Structure formats: structure tokens, C-alpha cells
DNA sequence: ATAATAACAGTAATTATTACTGTTACCATA
DNA sequence: TATGGTAACAGTAATAATTACTGTTATTAT
């Protein structure tokens, strides 16, 4: 009941997100996919991003600033968010999954995943700061 | 230029957030503060929550689901978010600040803070699941 | 006291996202 | 290779959360 049915719009959205290294918002993805399907609806983009995130094909990143961002990278990884320009950058760092066990020690629920966001200034914003 | 000026509304918001152990939304705080200042404006609540968070007096927690939440606890700590009922719970766990150094190793920017959100099911939602 | 301005209440506007409606495309079965 | 069931669609309306605007009030320095 309620089986997932193929759609080229979803396929296109998925491929687009997975091919990009930046972390686009729903709106940015909408603008891109429109070049292939000119009358795709923004609602369709939102719905499919949500479905793809639920399936684990893409990752949804919620920041304090503005719209949610999406990441098509398969392997698990963490993110840096610049507090100046709000850019999101993938971090190449060693696995820290063991923090889940530490978190679960004095906790009565069941922890199955986590997200870490690191904050600070990116290289560009540090550079710009010096030229004041 | 632009020095911070005292206001009893801000004071009240700050005390309220810091006295609560749940993690209220702006709207919940609004409803509470209205019992003291019946004609306080929702905009005032938002503005002051933002100011207080910038000053580090309270913490802003952005989840994927619904409105942002606020936490008045002084000591640094991490949060668990239930993927069923979306409740936010403070975690009593050992300090893991060293993950910042691990994150900074192959990164060209400057990391100064981080936020970890752990996900899963809380005790109540596990209990409810069994009674199906 | 007075003057400068941060903060306010009230309201309007914006942004991001979700829901609704009639139509189309996918896919299983005949 | 028709046909029927329904997921997905485009287009649009609605909602939720947050921010901005405007005229007035409160705080603080002089």
C-alpha cells in the first residue's frame, strides 16, 4: 500500500543534489531543475527532497540562518557553518561515532544517530576581516 | 554607538527561559511573559531572544521540525531530539570538546564552537510503540 | 530637566514550507 | 496493448515562523 512510483522529476532532483558539492537550498535546486523541466513546481521539489531525505539518499541540514540545505554525499560526514557568510562546508575528519555511546550512558531513550555542526569563520571571511 | 539599554521585558524573558527546564519556543515564551506584561508584543520576544542568544545568556536550538527552541542553561551541554514527539532533552554526558580539534585538522578556517544533536526515540515513545 | 536614542506595542510584510485540487504518468493486470 | 488504480504532478492557496516598519515610550547620559 502506497508504493513509491518512479518519476523523472525525482530522479533529476536526486542526481542534481548528488552531483553538487555546495549545499543548495530547495529554491536553488528548483532553479536548477527548471532548466531541464521548465514547468516543474516548487512544491514538487520540496516533496521529493523530503522523500529522498527520508530514504537516506540525501541529507537535510537545518541551520539557524535561513532555509534548509541539502547534501547529496553518500558517506557520513560532518559540517562546518561559517557564522559570517553562512556557507556550509564538508569536513574531512576522523569518525567520531563513539560519541553516541557516551551520550547514551545516562540516558533512558534510544539514540540511533547524530548531527554535529561546527561553527566559526571560513578561510575567505578570515581574509576579508584582515582588510578592514 | 548603539549601547544596550535595560528593559524589564528583556529581563523577564531572560529569567523565564533560565527558570524553565523544558525548551520553549518563542511562542511559548510569549504566552508565559504575557502573564506578567499582558501587552508585550511577540516581536519584542523574538528580538530579545535573539539579543540574549547573541550575548550568550541563552542558547538557540534549531531543529528540522517546527519552531526554534531556547535553552537557558548556563553550562555547556548537548541535546537529544526525539524523532517521534520532537521533544528536546538535555544530555548529561562527559565533555567532548576535543572533537573541535579533530574537526580542525584538515580545515582551513577557524572553528570556535559546535553543536551536537542526538536523535532517536525517547523513553515515552519507546513505551508507546510497544502498545500497538 | 532635557535630549538622544534603544526599546517598545501594534501591525504589516516576508520567507520558507506545506496543503489542496484537478490532471497526468506510471505500472500492474487482464 | 487497453484499462484501471493511484502516486506524482503543476499550479495555486494557505500556513507557520520570523522579521521589518512606524509612531510612541522608557532609559540613561549630560
Image (tube, coloured by chain):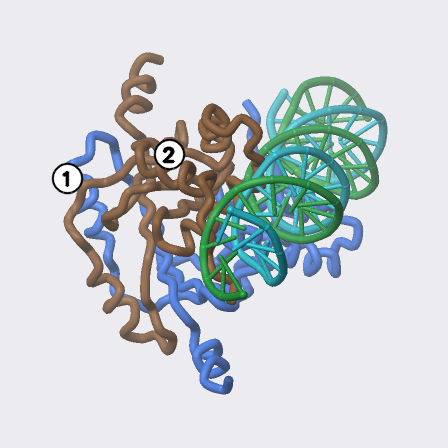
Chain colours: A brown, B blue, C green, D cyan
Residue A16: mark: 2
Residue at 22%, 59% in the rendered image? A97
Q: Residues within 10 Å of mark 1 (few under 14, many from 20)?
A: few
Residue at 20%, 44% in the rendered image? B103
Residue mark closest to the camera, 2 vs 1: 2
Residue at 49%, 37% in the rendered image? A26
Residue A69 position, x and y percent, is 43, 39
Is D22 left or right of A43, judged from the image as shown? right
Residue A71: mark: none
Is B131 left or right of B38, judged from the image as shown? left
Q: Residue furthest top?
A: A131
Q: Residues within 10 Å of mark 2 (few under 14, many from 20)?
A: some
Q: Is residue B103 visible?
A: yes
Dot 2 falls on a residue whose secondary structure is helix
Residue C13 position, x and y percent, is 73, 28
Residue at 20%, 63% in the rendered image? A98
Instruction: Determine the chain carrying the residue at label 1.
Output: B
| Residue A131 in the image: above or below residue B131 | above
Instruction: Determine the chain carrying the residue at label 2.
Output: A
Asked whether the residues under marks 2 and 1 belong to the same chain, the reply is: no
> Is A59 or B115 nearer to us in this picture?
A59
Q: Which residue is mark 1?
A: B105
Q: Residue furthest bottom?
A: B131
Residue C2 position, x and y percent, is 78, 20
**Callout 2 touching callout 1 (CB < 8 Å):** no
| Residue A105 in the image: above or below residue A9 | below
* Quarter placement of the C terminus of chain A: top left
Residue B16 position, x and y percent, is 60, 59
Q: Is residue B58 visible?
A: no
> Is A59 or B101 nearer to us in this picture?
A59
Amino acid at each position: 500500500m502506497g508504493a513509491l512510483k518512479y518519476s523523472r522529476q525525482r530522479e533529476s532532483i536526486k542526481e542534481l543534489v548528488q552531483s553538487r558539492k555546495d549545499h543548495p537550498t530547495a529554491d536553488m535546486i528548483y532553479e536548477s531543475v527548471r532548466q531541464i523541466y521548465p514547468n516543474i513546481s516548487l512544491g514538487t521539489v520540496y516533496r521529493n527532497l523530503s522523500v529522498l531525505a527520508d530514504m537516506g539518499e540525501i541529507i537535510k541540514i537545518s541551520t539557524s540562518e535561513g532555509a534548509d540545505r541539502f547534501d547529496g554525499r553518500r558517506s557520513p560526514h560532518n559540517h562546518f557553518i561559517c557564522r559570517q557568510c553562512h556557507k556550509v562546508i564538508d569536513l574531512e575528519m576522523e569518525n567520531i561515532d563513539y560519541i553516541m555511546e557516551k551520550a547514551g550512558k545516562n540516558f533512558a531513550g534510544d539514540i540511533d544517530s547524530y548531527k554535529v555542526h561546527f561553527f566559526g569563520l571560513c578561510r575567505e571571511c578570515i581574509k576579508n576581516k584582515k582588510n578592514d
